Image (cartoon, rainbow, N blue to C red):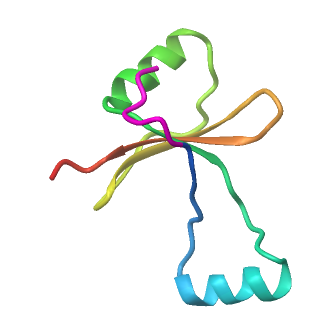
Amino acid sequence: MNVTNDLVSVRYMVNDVQESIDFYTRHLGFGGWNRIHFIVEDIEGEVARLRDAGVSLPNDIVSGPGGQQIVLDDPSGNPIELFQPASR
C-alpha cells in the first residue's frame, strides 16, 4: 500500500465536536471508537487490491465532502480506515 505520509492518525466520527469532547474527557478520560487511519492516493485501487488478496471489506467506499473512506477490520476485529482526501 502506498501511504501519502508517514503519519497515522486517530479519527472520531461524531455529530457534535464540542459535545463529544466534553463527554469523552469528563466521563471517559478521553475514550471512544478509534481506529488506525491510513491516507491513500487511490482508494479504489487499494480496495480492489485488498479484495483480490481475500481481505473482507464488509462495506463499500463512502464519499463525502472531505473525501472517500472505507473501514475494514484487522484479524483481531480492530477497525482500520483507508481515507483518500478530496481533491483540492
As drawn, which residue projects farthest toward the front? 6
**19 above or below 42?**
below
Give the residue drawn at x 41%, y 22%: 2
- Image-based side of 86 in relation to 60, left or right: left
**51 above or below 76?**
above
Q: In x, y percent, where is residue 42?
A: 32, 29
Tally of marks = 0
Q: In x, y percent, where is residue 10?
A: 60, 55
Give the residue drawn at x 42%, y 41%: 61
Q: Is residue 88 visible?
A: yes
- Image-based side of 52 in relation to 80, left or right: left
Give the residue drawn at x 76%, y 74%: 30
- Image-based side of 82 in relation to 88, left or right: right
Q: Main secondary structure of the magenta part?
A: loop
Question: Residue 49: within the magenta?
Answer: no
Q: Where are the magenta residues, as a range?
A: 1-7
Q: Is residue 16 visible?
A: no
**45 above or below 70?**
above
As drawn, which residue projects farthest toward the left? 88
Q: Quadrant of residue 81?
A: top right
Question: Which residue occupies the foreground of this view, 63 or 74?
Answer: 74
As drawn, which residue projects farthest toward the top? 53
Question: Residue 4: within the magenta?
Answer: yes
Q: In x, y percent, where is residue 44?
A: 35, 28
Give the residue drawn at x 47%, y 35%: 6
